[in-house]
Amino acid sequence: MTGVMGILLCVVVLPLLIIFHYVTKWKQTKSLSSEDEKMLEDLWASAQKMESRINTLETILDKTSTDWRKHT
Protein backbone atom coordinates (compact mmCIF):
# COMPACT_ATOMS: atom_id res chain seq x y z
CA MET A 1 0.00 0.00 0.00
CA THR A 2 2.85 2.41 0.75
CA GLY A 3 4.31 1.70 -2.69
CA VAL A 4 1.06 2.80 -4.33
CA MET A 5 0.99 5.95 -2.23
CA GLY A 6 4.59 6.72 -3.20
CA ILE A 7 3.82 6.27 -6.89
CA LEU A 8 0.73 8.50 -6.62
CA LEU A 9 2.80 11.11 -4.82
CA CYS A 10 5.47 11.08 -7.53
CA VAL A 11 3.07 10.90 -10.48
CA VAL A 12 0.23 13.20 -9.40
CA VAL A 13 0.99 15.37 -6.40
CA LEU A 14 4.58 16.48 -7.05
CA PRO A 15 3.99 17.57 -10.68
CA LEU A 16 0.95 19.58 -9.59
CA LEU A 17 2.95 21.28 -6.85
CA ILE A 18 5.69 22.15 -9.33
CA ILE A 19 3.17 23.52 -11.84
CA PHE A 20 1.39 25.63 -9.21
CA HIS A 21 4.72 26.94 -7.94
CA TYR A 22 5.82 28.17 -11.36
CA VAL A 23 2.38 29.56 -12.22
CA THR A 24 2.45 31.74 -9.12
CA LYS A 25 6.02 32.85 -9.90
CA TRP A 26 4.95 33.73 -13.45
CA LYS A 27 2.01 35.79 -12.19
CA GLN A 28 4.25 37.70 -9.78
CA THR A 29 6.71 38.67 -12.50
CA LYS A 30 3.91 39.50 -14.93
CA SER A 31 3.01 42.78 -13.22
CA LEU A 32 5.07 45.95 -13.47
CA SER A 33 7.13 47.13 -10.56
CA SER A 34 6.90 50.72 -9.35
CA GLU A 35 10.28 51.43 -10.96
CA ASP A 36 9.00 50.10 -14.29
CA GLU A 37 5.89 52.27 -14.05
CA LYS A 38 8.00 55.34 -13.30
CA MET A 39 10.28 54.58 -16.25
CA LEU A 40 7.26 54.19 -18.56
CA GLU A 41 5.86 57.52 -17.37
CA ASP A 42 9.21 59.20 -18.05
CA LEU A 43 9.41 57.64 -21.50
CA TRP A 44 5.86 58.74 -22.26
CA ALA A 45 6.65 62.32 -21.22
CA SER A 46 9.82 62.31 -23.33
CA ALA A 47 7.91 61.00 -26.34
CA GLN A 48 5.29 63.74 -25.94
CA LYS A 49 8.02 66.41 -25.81
CA MET A 50 9.72 64.97 -28.88
CA GLU A 51 6.44 64.90 -30.78
CA SER A 52 5.85 68.54 -29.93
CA ARG A 53 9.35 69.47 -31.08
CA ILE A 54 8.96 67.56 -34.34
CA ASN A 55 5.66 69.30 -35.03
CA THR A 56 7.32 72.66 -34.38
CA LEU A 57 10.21 71.81 -36.71
CA GLU A 58 7.81 70.70 -39.44
CA THR A 59 5.88 73.95 -39.09
CA ILE A 60 9.10 75.96 -39.42
CA LEU A 61 10.20 73.93 -42.44
CA ASP A 62 6.76 74.31 -44.07
CA LYS A 63 7.11 78.10 -43.81
CA THR A 64 10.74 78.37 -44.90
CA SER A 65 11.09 75.55 -47.43
CA THR A 66 7.80 74.39 -48.87
CA ASP A 67 9.24 71.48 -50.85
CA TRP A 68 11.20 69.87 -48.03
CA ARG A 69 8.75 66.96 -47.79
CA LYS A 70 9.53 65.92 -51.37
CA HIS A 71 13.15 65.20 -50.42
CA THR A 72 12.30 62.74 -47.67
Image (cartoon, rainbow, N blue to C red):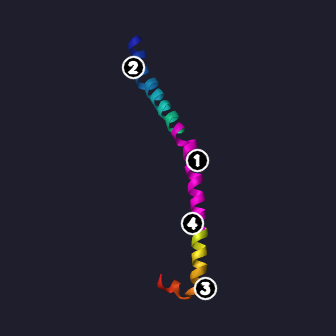
**Callout 1, which amino acid?**
Glu
Image disc number at residue 27: none
Q: Earlier in the sequence, mark 4 or mark 1?
A: 1
Magenta stretch in the rendered image: 28-51
Residue under numbered circle 4? 50
Pointer 2 residue: 7
Residue matched to label 3: 63
Magenta span includes 34: yes
Q: Could you tell me how far apart the alpha carbons at marks 3 and 2 are, in whole angstroms?
A: 81 Å
Label 3 residue SS: helix
Residue beneath the point at 40% across and 16% down: 6
| Residue kind at label 2, given as amino acid type | Ile
Tell me where residue 62 appears, x and y as whole percent: 59, 84
Main SS, magenta region, reads: helix
Residue in the image at 50% along x and 34% along y: 25
Q: CA distance from mark 4 to mark 2?
A: 63 Å
Residue 1 in which image quadrant:
top left
Q: Which residue is mark 1?
A: 37
First along the sequence among labels 4 and 2? 2
Q: Secondary structure at mark 2?
A: helix
Taking the magenta stretch, the answer to whether it contains residue 35 is yes
Q: Is residue 39 in view?
A: yes
Is residue 24 shown left or right of residue 6? right
Q: Is residue 44 left or right of residue 13?
A: right
